[in-house]
Image: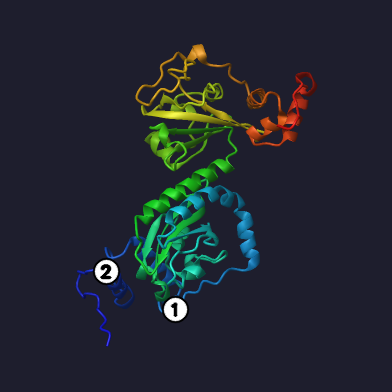
Amino acid sequence: MQIRTAPPSGPFFVTPQQRIELARERYFEQGERPSGLVSEAVIQSWTRCLRARREPAEQATFSPVTASRTHHALARNRTLLESAQPVLRELEQAIHGSGCCFILTDAQGIVIDASPSSLSNVALTPLVTRIGVNLGEDEVGTSAPGIVVRTGSACAVHGAEHFFQNIKGMYCAAAPIREASGSLAAVLDISIENAELPFDVPALVGMYATGIENRLLIACSRSPILLRLQVNPTLFGTPLEALVAVNEDGHVAWMNTAADRLLMRAELRHAGPPHIEELLGCSFEHLLAAAATGNARMHRASNGLGVWVTAKLLTADGISGAMVSLGTPAPTDTTTATASPETPATTDDAALQPAAPQSLQDASRQTIEQALAKANGNVSRAARALGVSRGLLYRRLREWGQAEASGHSAERP
């Protein structure tokens, strides 16, 4: 005969499972709030499920939504999926062999991408990871992605913390992915079945969610200038980099969480979008005129913090300029052009600063001309370098009346 170990009746417990079972007993059977036994996010989710007249003994199902709704969800989130793919593939490789899987849902909780589990003794995972399955709280009760969809805050749900008893074998942690407006764009979840989370999954899922969010913000940005900054330039290109998009009038269009933490002073937080001069002490024109050195440079932000900054020009016709440095331009002497963070260059700005473009149209023209010069006049190579079509370059050249005069070649590379 199998002997079942009952959870302690007092305030003490031996295992996490006993703690959760005690919380369920106090909440569902005794009507007591189990504060301190499970997270507040879980308690609030349990409360919402009960108010919706759901019962823990019900069988949660993972039925996909209709094919048309699935197609609509995938189409509506095409930019998100394209932005997320490189990050998700890295995540899939990182967790392969751990038994974990990732799940990406849209803002409504519909699964739009997922990876399989490497474990063989799983029953729920193949159901949960189907494209089109609704993991919202109204459908499957308490779960990490469901809570994030409802609250917008990262959380973890362990085993029996799930509302429905038939899915208490799942362990999951999820984090939000936000749009530039701050509204929820998607949810990234990492789950494992029949096992505790094998590492710091909340930290890992938060890092990869930030990576997706940064790529999505850049992909959707319509601002002419994108700044990347951090206290250490080695953090560029990682989820820890700070991003700031600047509009034509010099006001900040959006910034990610890392930039907000680095630059925003208390007096700016409730005063509307700040001007770039309030954050970095430099003008929009200065950003346009930053020297195209390719090296990040140290800059003193208006709050006194020393940050390394690069700027990318995103012109009105969709042509991305090269990364340009903000602050002291790199010296022309190759022996000192790679100044380290410990020894920032101090070359005089005025001596090396190029003429500033007077408008975004001028900046676009300079970017195209520089690309054509590097490609020795070959339009095909220049277009590939800029990430645009040859037709767009030809139209720009015709508009400027330069197509015949400059003798640019359209030959194959």
From this viewpoint, which residue is outermost toward the front? 413
Residue 34 appears in view: yes
Taking the image as shown, residue 136 lies to the left or right of residue 264, namely right
**Of residues 286 and 248, the one drawn nearer to the viewer in this rendering:** 286
**Of residues 223 and 206, the one drawn nearer to the viewer in this rendering:** 206
Q: What is the x, y in percent for residue 40?
A: 34, 61
The secondary element bearing badge 2 is classed as helix
Disc 1 and disc 2: Cα gap in Å?
A: 22 Å
Instruction: Report which residue position mark 2 lands on.
Output: 19
Name the amino acid, label 2.
Answer: Arg
182 over 140 or under it: above or below: above
Q: How is the image coloured?
A: rainbow
The secondary element bearing badge 1 is classed as loop
Quarter of the image that includes the N terminus? bottom left
Q: Quadrant of residue 265?
A: top left
Task: Look at 47% across and 68% down and name the residue there.
Answer: 125
Task: Look at 25% across and 83% down and name the residue there.
Answer: 3
Along the polypeptide, which appears first: circle 1 or circle 2? 2
How packed is label 1: few (under 14 Cα within 10 Å), some, or many (20 or more)? Answer: few
How packed is label 2: few (under 14 Cα within 10 Å), some, or many (20 or more)? Answer: many
Quarter of the image that includes the C terminus? top right
The disc label shown at residue 58, or none: 1
From this viewpoint, which residue is outermost toward the right? 404
From this viewpoint, which residue is outermost toward the bottom? 1
